[in-house]
Image (cartoon, helix red, strand yellow):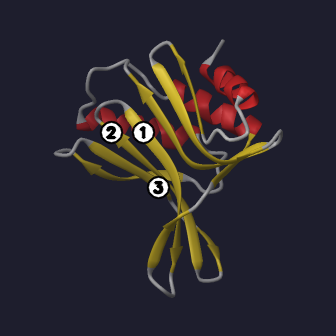
Amino acid sequence: MTLSQKIAVALHDRSSESTVVEAAEDACKVVLRLREASGVGVALEALEFSTTRRDAWSPDALRAWGDRIASRLTYLMEPLVVLELDPIGGEAEIRSQTPTRRGEQYSYYQIRLHKDGGLRLVRTLFNAEERTKTPGLCRFTNEVLERLVDDLEGSVAV
């Protein structure tokens, strides 16, 4: 069973009170921080993915991983781009190239990659009038979530 199939089963089998759903396969693990889930889709506070296929990711490897993720996740609301690389901290940041605007509010995806092989995907809301950022929800149909998990797992080249 693939990682995406395992997370689909875990979502289906979860108790209604469960806000964290996780699955692991081979050297990869995915954790969903749920706000809502239905037979159609999910609303996530965050999606966390990790792999142990490497001991540590160099800055160049992080940038390449970020580029692979951005090139694979073309079906999200906005195209993604590697925005920042912190070689000292061992992190890379991927963001929506052009945020979605609704009135004075902008929303965008943000993915933080870590040198330990972990990543965290969130949605951020920015109010231009008040100059404030707040966490948003990542809303995916079940099919898109499974594809997303497959693409994250596939982006880990050794």
User: Farthest residue toward the left?
Assistant: 88
**Mark 3 = which residue?**
95
Q: Tag 1, which secondary structure? A: strand
Q: Is residue 75 left or right of residue 106?
A: right
Task: Return the disc, 3 or 1, that comes first in the chain's sequence.
Answer: 3
- Residue at 31% from the left image edge and 32% from the top image edge: 61
Question: Is disc 3 placed on a helix, strand or loop?
Answer: strand
Percent across and percent down for residue 104 are 59, 83
Across and down, in percent, residue 12 comes to: 76, 29
User: For the residues marked 3 and 2, what is the alpha-carbon distance in whole angstroms?
Assistant: 15 Å
Q: Residue at x 65, y 55 (%)?
A: 77
Instruction: Classify residue 98 by image quadrant.
Output: bottom right
Mark linked to residue 114: 2
The three-letter code of the residue at mark 2 reads His
- Label 1 belongs to which residue? 119
Q: For the point 24% across and 38% down, which residue is it?
A: 59
Disc nearest the viewer among 3 and 1: 1
Q: Cβ–Cβ below 8 Å for labels 2 and 1?
A: yes
The reply to whether discs 3 and 1 touch (Cβ–Cβ < 8 Å) is no
